Amino acid sequence: MAIKGDLAMSAPELNAFLDSVFPQVRGEFLIEDLAPGEVTMRLAVRERHLRPGGTVSGPAMFSLADVAVYALVLSMVGPKALAVTTNASLDFMRKPAADADLIATGRLLKLGKLLAVGDVLLHSEGMADPVARASMTYAIPPS
Amino acid sequence: MAIKGDLAMSAPELNAFLDSVFPQVRGEFLIEDLAPGEVTMRLAVRERHLRPGGTVSGPAMFSLADVAVYALVLSMVGPKALAVTTNASLDFMRKPAADADLIATGRLLKLGKLLAVGDVLLHSEGMADPVARASMTYAIPPS
Amino acid sequence: MAIKGDLAMSAPELNAFLDSVFPQVRGEFLIEDLAPGEVTMRLAVRERHLRPGGTVSGPAMFSLADVAVYALVLSMVGPKALAVTTNASLDFMRKPAADADLIATGRLLKLGKLLAVGDVLLHSEGMADPVARASMTYAIPPS
Amino acid sequence: MAIKGDLAMSAPELNAFLDSVFPQVRGEFLIEDLAPGEVTMRLAVRERHLRPGGTVSGPAMFSLADVAVYALVLSMVGPKALAVTTNASLDFMRKPAADADLIATGRLLKLGKLLAVGDVLLHSEGMADPVARASMTYAIPPS
C-alpha cells in the first residue's frame, strides 16, 4: 500500500546523510531496512531517552517517528535537508521497555510535489504489540 | 500487527447491529471482511456523499473511518453501543472518485479496558493509492 | 493571536458563497460573526445531524469545524472553492445537546502561500464547556 | 473557555515537582504564570534544543507542549506523576528563532475522571505569530 518508485538514496547513503545533518544524535537513529515507500529504523535507546518510571520518553518516540518519515521522503526525493514537518499526530498506546531499543516501521502513503505523508508503528524490540503509532506530514521545498 | 483474540461478533451480526443503531444510514456501511483486529468496510457512495467538484466529501470519509474502527472495537467487546470516539486524526491525501465506492481497511492497534485505538486506510474502489488515512480513539464504557 | 489583515469577503458574501458551493446544506451553516482571523459559525442542528442517544453526530461536528476553517481561509484569500482540507485533528470531549445548535468559534493561526491552519472550539449553544476542539489544515490552490 | 476550579498546586510547587520527576531537564521548563485551566510556560532554549538551520527542533517543541499540558492537569488534580500522554497532535507553522526562548500558552479544555485534554500555542519570545499549535490528551490514573 506504500508508494512505489525508485530509491534516490540507499540506506547507507541515508544513514550518512542523517549523521551529517543531525550530528548531535550521530549513531542513534539507524536505518536497518529500506525499500521504496518502506523503512525500518532503530533508535538505540540510551539513558537520555528514558523517563522516570522506567520507560522511553515521549519526545524520543516523537523523534524516531519523525526521522523515520523524513528518511522515507528523502529516500525518494534525494537529500533535501530542508524538508520540514508540518503536522504530527501520535497515539501512545503502551509503555515502551526501558531496556530495549525502539524499532520504527514506516510507510510512505503520499509523495506529492509539495506534501508527503507517512505513518509509522513503534515497537520495543521483542514486543509484539506496538507502543505507539504516528503520522507525519512533510512539506517538500521546491527543486 | 493488529490485535489478536476471539471475535465477539461476526460480520453479519455487526452489520445488523450497525443498521439497528444507525437506522438513518441503513445499508450504506457494509462490513465485507472481518477477522480479529482487521476489517474491510464499504461505503456505498451515493449522491449525498458527494461534494461539488466530483468527489466524496470529507464528512463521508470521516464517517467511514469512524464506523470502521467502531466495528473493530465492537467485534472484540460485543455490542456496546455507547463506545464513543474521543479523538480523530485524518490526512486527506488524494481526491476520491465520485463514481466509485469507498473501501476502508482498518486494524485495531490497542484494545485496553478504557481506550481502544485503530487506524484506517481509505481507497476509492479500483484505485491503488489511498485517498485518506485516519486514526481513531474510542472510549469503552465499563461493563 | 489570530492572523491579522484585511477581509477579502464579508460575512454575507461568505454565507452566499457557501450556499452556492454546498447547495445540499443550504442554510445549515451560518456565519454569525467575522473579523480578520476570527469567525463564529452556527450549525442549525436538525434531525439528520443527530445520533442515537440524543446527541449530535461526529460527522456533523467534523463538518462544522471544517466549514468554519474554510470560511476563515476564504475570508482572507477570496472565493477559492478549490481550497482543500489536508489534515484534520479532533478531540471529542463532551456530549453535545441534541436540542441546541452547535456554535463554532474559530481562529486562523497561519495563512501561508500554500497552507493555512486554523483551530476551532465547538459549543452546544448555552453550554459553557466546549464539546469538541478541532484543528484543520487547508491547501490553497495557486492563484 | 478553559476549565475553572481551584488550583491543587501553585506554580512554585509545580516547578519543584517537575524538577523532581524530570531531573535531567531541571531548570529548562519554567511555569511563569498559572491560573485554573491556564498556564504560561517557558522553555529556556539551549544548544541541545537546536536543529541545523538555526531553529528549535520538533522534539523540543513537542516536549514543551507536552509538559505544559501535564502541568495544567497536575495543577488541578495534584502531583500524580503517572498521568500519561495518550494522544498528541501538532501543527508546525513557522520556524522558531534559535536565539529566543519558546513560550507556551496552554489551556485545559476538559478534565474528566479518566481523560484530560489541553491545547497549547507556542511562540518564540518576541514574535507575534505562533510557531506551533498542539493538543494533548492525558490519561489520569485512578486515585
Image (cartoon, coloured by chain):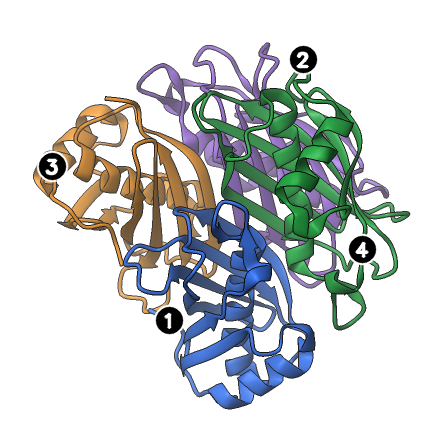
Chain colours: A green, B purple, C orange, D blue
Label 2 vs label 4: CA separation?
Answer: 31 Å
State which chain disc 3 sits on: C
Instruction: List the residue tagged with mark 1.
Output: D2
Q: For mark 1, name the chain.
A: D
Disc 4 and disc 1 on one polypeptide chain: no
Q: Are marks 3 and 1 in contact (CB under 8 Å)?
A: no
> On the rendered image, what quadrant is the N terminus of chain A found in?
top right
SS at mark 1 in the image: loop
Q: Residue at x 50, y 65 (%)?
A: D45
Mark 2 belongs to which amino acid? Asp
Q: Amino acid at mark 3?
A: Met
Front tag of 4 and 3: 4
Whichever of callouts 2 and 4 sits on the residue coming sooner in the sequence is 2
Please state if A105 lies on the left or on the right of B130 as rendered: right
Of D85 and B83, the residue lying toward us: D85
Tell me where residue C115 appears, x and y as whole percent.
Answer: 35, 35
Going by the image, does C10 lie left or right of B123? Answer: left
The percent position of residue C55, horizontal first and vertical second, equals 42, 53
Q: CA distance from mark 4 to mark 1?
A: 37 Å
Q: Amino acid at mark 1?
A: Ala
Compared to residue C92, the image places residue B90 above or below, namely: above
Q: Residue at x 74, y 30 (%)?
A: A39
Q: Secondary structure at mark 4?
A: loop
**Observer-nearest residue: C43 or B107?**
B107
For label 3, the residue is: C9
Q: Chain of mark 4?
A: A
Q: Residues within 10 Å of mark 1 (few under 14, many from 20)?
A: some
